Image (cartoon, rainbow, N blue to C red):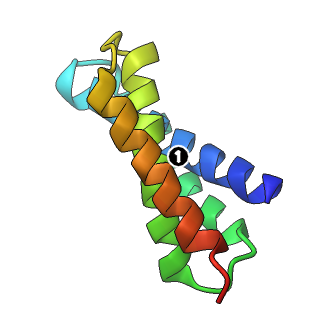
Amino acid sequence: MISAIVLFIIAGLAEIGGGYLVWLWLRESASPWYGVFGSLILVLYGVIPTLQNFPTFGRVYAAYGGVFIVLAILWGWWVDKNTPDMYDFIGAAICLIGVSIILWAPR
């Protein structure tokens, strides 16, 4: 379970970080190298979820979506300095509950 959580976090950070670098390049006129490195990180993001031990692609990506939401809120708080409100935290908690049900419900 710990390795699954770590892989979800690493994949989320790769997607958000890579996307952020591309954002800086295209929207904030940063160096084209930001776009190059961001794109490489996004390719790495595409590989990381394949390291999960869950047997179904759809279930892994559905669960990852919930983790991504939480990481995106935290990224906005720490990097963009946009403080989440109570509804952000409630929504994030609901997403994590959903992720837990998707991944670890007895089947």
- What residue appears at the point 41 percent right and 41 percent down from the top-left corner? 92
Q: Position of residue 107 (x, y in %)?
A: 64, 90
The residue closer to the viewer here, 12 or 43, is 12
Is residue 51 rendered to the left or right of residue 101?
right
The residue at the far left in this view is 27
Q: Position of residue 89 (x, y in %)?
A: 39, 31
Residue 46 visible to the viewer = no
Residue located beneath label 1 in the image:
12
The residue closer to the viewer here, 90 or 63, is 90
Vertical side of 16 occupied by 62: above or below: below
- What residue appears at the point 28 percent right and 31 percent down from the top-left corner? 87
The residue closer to the viewer here, 40 or 96, is 96
Q: Secondary structure at mark 1?
A: helix
Classify 10 Å Cα crowding around label 1: few (below 14), some (14-19), many (20 and above). many
Q: Position of residue 20 (x, y in %)?
A: 37, 31
Vertical side of 27 occupied by 101: above or below: below
The amino acid sitting under disc 1 is Gly
Q: How many marks?
A: 1
Q: Quadrant of the N terminus?
A: bottom right
- What residue appears at the point 72 percent right and 67 percent down from the top-left corner? 51
Q: Position of residue 99 (x, y in %)?
A: 52, 61
The residue at the far right in this view is 2
